[in-house]
Amino acid sequence: MRILAVVALLALTGCTTDVIYKTVPVEVPVGIPCKVPAVATPSWATNGITPKNTLFEQVRALEAANEQHKAFEAIILSANKACQ
């Protein structure tokens, strides 16, 4: 009987203790969505090339498309850099 009373006393002492709440600041990085406007794909100079065009016209269109690709890549890289 004594053992039962000791066990009950020990069990009840855990219920009577006061809980101490302590606020702890936690620093966690929070992702922020990137709000850069979508980059529109230009109309490439090579879209209008047909086999009927002369070699000079085809090469000129390819050179223009190359410049367009460089400019488009620069725009995409700057938009990507704005998100970082």
Image (tube, rainbow, N blue to C red):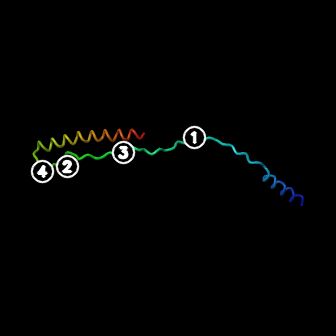
Per the image, label 3 sits on a secondary structure element best described as loop
The front one of 40 and 61 is: 40
| Mark 1 neighbour class, 10 Å CA radius: few under 14, some 14 to 19, many 20 or more | few
Residue picked out by circle 3:
37
Task: Using the numbered discs, state the Cα–Cα distance from disc 3 to disc 2 in whole angstroms.
Answer: 25 Å
Q: Quadrant of residue 21?
A: top right
Q: Residue at x 38, y 41 (%)?
A: 80
Which labelled disc corresponds to residue 51? 4
Task: Using the numbered discs, state the Cα–Cα distance from disc 1 to disc 2 in whole angstroms.
Answer: 52 Å
Q: Mark 1, mark 3: which one is toward the viewer?
A: 3
| Mark 2 neighbour class, 10 Å CA radius: few under 14, some 14 to 19, many 20 or more | few
Per the image, label 2 sits on a secondary structure element best described as helix
Q: Residue at x 26, y 42 (%)?
A: 69
N-term-proximal mark, 1 vs 2: 1
Which labelled disc corresponds to residue 47? 2
Q: Quadrant of the C terminus?
A: top left
Q: Quadrant of the N terminus?
A: bottom right
Percent x, y of residue 13 = 81, 52
N-term-proximal mark, 4 vs 1: 1
| Mark 3 neighbour class, 10 Å CA radius: few under 14, some 14 to 19, many 20 or more | few
Q: Quadrant of residue 33?
A: top left
Per the image, label 1 sits on a secondary structure element best described as loop
Percent x, y of residue 70 = 27, 39
Task: Using the numbered discs, state the Cα–Cα distance from disc 1 to disc 3 in whole angstroms.
Answer: 30 Å
Query: As shown in the figure, which amino acid type bears the numbered disc 1?
Result: Glu
Q: Is 84 on the left or on the right of 10, as rendered?
A: left
Residue picked out by circle 1:
27
Percent x, y of residue 65 = 21, 42
